Image (tube, rainbow, N blue to C red):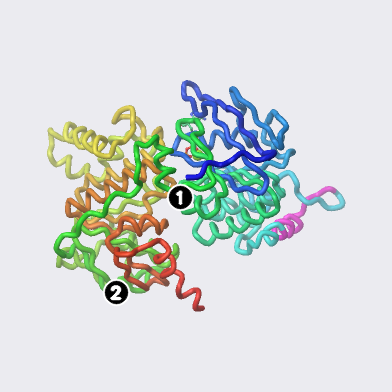
């Protein structure tokens, strides 16, 4: 690790900023400086205070104590407009677009082009928005579309374009990539590099280390509302130890040993949606990685196996018996469970308690026990909360009150309670902090050690390279490569995913 040496005049100084919400100290004397021509990453666990800091710098919140300086001059940011006047624009973690309005209206809010009578015509608005998109190379978003009809990734791109279009001197990006696919992330990084090369400052947060490594010139690590150091070079394990206060030293656990081959799940020519034909066997005790770029059939593969999407063709065997899961219920009965990525929309019922969310998928089984039911449910939930180290005040607390990482653990716990032999892990570490990621990795390897069979898709190739016994790379709906664990690297997985494209 290389500690950063101070330089001349910073474009942005956060000086001992503190901010509390009720009794929670979100920030406690947090400081860092960013310089012109620099991409500065802020990293830390969920709840470390990154978003609070960005809201203070963007004028969204006001600090309880501490100061902010821009280009060496102390300033008080009364509101976001004050920050904007000083050339400081923010893309917040939560989207801010007005969902019932059009793309163009959102993009050009409060700076609509006006005609001779001061009126804004639909046509004029549309062509102005098209011009803004064209400037940033965006061609696939319709300016007349309503925000609410667009997928999350497109909304995130619009938020980013809106900030970019103001020619920011300082651009603050709070987890801009968590909703983006590889292609949009590559686009964003291109725009960020242009700003940096023009001498601007970009502040960036992400829970994905490969993104930090790819784009950051300097990194400041936060823990518990306080900065714990700024660095120009930092290895992932060093960062993890700093973020967690050395609770976690090495991010990836050892791969579990592979037992003698016993097939748990066999596929032959499975097809549906963009999945053209997948044939492979997953064994007991194995972590079988599925790699490749989004949109090449991964999602379909997982949904079909879980009975949540109909197959167009192909066959599936569970321990030698042919199955055709037509609903998640049937998949679970066949011993197959899916842990999905998006805990907010696909998994959890936020107002319900941690206990209810955990036991949702096994209520049928537990209720057959009649009188023992309530006690069984309580015991099962309590055991899972302990096993997964879910940080919750009590089992009856609503899931919506937990931090993101802990919500994800509850979702994991629900499927573990089904005692399914085959576990489908679909990008479960998205937006999850390093400490929780580490716990999920440990859990996954422990499950494999117990003899469960794990099919594991991750959009982070680094994870697959460290944890999977082998990786199948999907490209255009087919298995384009099978990579063994020996000598496996993220680069090799990405190269196998891209090969076709390069040749084309
Ligand atoms: N408006 C609020 N009211 C109450 N508590 C808040 C509020 N905003 C943030 N907090 C608390 O402040 C702490 C810091 O939150 P913050 O959102 O800044 O973390 P973060 O580092 O951005 O986390 P993540 O990586 O999950 O986005 C957390 O404990 C959070 O629950
Ligand atoms: Mg945040």
Q: Secondary structure at mark 1?
A: loop
Is residue 128 rendered magenta in the image?
yes
Is residue 162 rendered magenta in the image?
no
Q: Residue at x 51, y 48 (%)?
A: 233
Tell me if residue 453 comes above or below residue 390 in the rendering.
Answer: below
Decide if residue 256 is on the left or right side of residue 8: left
Q: What is the crowding at mark 1: few (fewer than 14 residues within 10 Å), some, or many (at least 20)?
A: many
Q: Which label sits on residue 208?
A: 1
Q: Pinpoint residue 79: horizontal percent, then vertical percent.
A: 67, 32
Which range of residues does the magenta coloring cover? 118-131
Please state which of the two labelled residues, at mark 2 or mark 1, is closer to the viewer. 1
Which residue in the protein does label 2 denote?
269
Principal SS element in the magenta part? helix
Tell me if residue 489 comes above or below residue 88 in the rendering.
Answer: below
Q: Residue at x 29, y 63 (%)?
A: 485
Quadrant position of residue 312: bottom left
Q: Residue at x 29, y 49 (%)?
A: 253
Q: What is the crowding at mark 2: few (fewer than 14 residues within 10 Å), some, or many (at least 20)?
A: some
Decide if residue 109 is on the left or right side of residue 317: right
Decide if residue 257 is on the left or right side of residue 54: left
């Amino acid at each position: 690790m290389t500690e950063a040496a101070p330089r001349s005049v910073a474009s942005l100084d956060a000086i001992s900023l503190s901010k509390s919400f009720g009794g929670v100290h979100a920030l406690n004397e947090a400081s860092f400086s960013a310089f012109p021509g620099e991409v500065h990453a802020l990293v830390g666990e969920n709840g470390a205070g990154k978003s609070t800091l960005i809201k203070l710098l963007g004028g969204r919140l006001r600090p309880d104590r501490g100061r902010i300086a821009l280009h060496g001059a102390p300033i008080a940011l009364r509101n976001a407009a004050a920050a904007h006047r000083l050339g400081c624009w923010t893309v917040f973690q939560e989207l801010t677009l007005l969902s019932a309005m059009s793309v163009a209206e959102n993009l050009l809010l409060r700076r609509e082009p006006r005609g001779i009578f001061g009126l804004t015509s639909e046509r004029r608005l549309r062509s102005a928005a098209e011009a803004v998109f064209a400037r940033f190379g965006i061609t696939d978003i319709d300016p007349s579309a309503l925000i609410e009809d667009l997928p999350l990734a497109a909304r995130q791109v619009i938020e980013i374009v809106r900030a970019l279009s103001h020619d920011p001197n300082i651009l603050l990006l709070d987890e801009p990539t968590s909703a983006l696919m590889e292609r949009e992330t590559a686009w964003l990084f291109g725009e960020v590099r242009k700003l940096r090369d023009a001498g601007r400052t970009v502040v960036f947060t992400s829970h994905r280390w490969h993104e930090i490594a790819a784009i950051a010139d300097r990194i400041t690590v936060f823990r518990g509302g306080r900065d714990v150091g700024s660095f120009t070079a930092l290895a992932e394990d060093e960062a993890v130890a700093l973020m967690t206060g050395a609770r976690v030293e090495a991010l990836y656990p050892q791969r579990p040993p592979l037992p003698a081959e016993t097939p748990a799940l066999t596929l032959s020519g499975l097809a549906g949606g963009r999945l053209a034909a997948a044939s492979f066997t997953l064994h007991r005790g194995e972590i079988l990685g599925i790699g490749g770029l989004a949109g090449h059939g991964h999602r379909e593969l997982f949904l079909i196996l879980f009975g949540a999407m109909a197959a167009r063709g192909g066959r599936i065997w569970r321990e030698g018996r042919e199955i055709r899961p037509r609903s998640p219920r049937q998949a679970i009965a066949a011993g197959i469970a899916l842990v999905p990525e998006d805990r907010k929309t696909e998994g959890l019922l936020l107002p319900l308690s941690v206990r209810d969310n955990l036991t949702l998928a096994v209520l049928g089984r537990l209720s057959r026990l009649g009188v023992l039911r309530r006690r069984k449910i309580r015991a099962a939930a309590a055991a899972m909360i302990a096993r997964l180290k879910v940080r919750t005040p009590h089992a009856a607390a609503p899931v919506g009150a937990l931090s993101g990482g802990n919500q994800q653990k509850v979702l994991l716990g629900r499927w573990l309670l089904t005692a399914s032999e085959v576990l489908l892990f679909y990008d479960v570490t998205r937006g999850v902090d390093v400490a929780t990621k580490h716990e999920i990795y440990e859990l996954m390897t422990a499950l494999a050690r117990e003899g469960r069979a794990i099919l594991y898709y991750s959009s982070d190739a680094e994870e697959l390279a460290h944890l999977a016994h082998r990786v199948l790379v999907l490209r255009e709906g087919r298995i384009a490569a099978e990579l063994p664990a020996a000598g496996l690297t993220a680069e090799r997985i990405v190269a196998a995913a891209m090969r076709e494209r390069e040749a084309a």
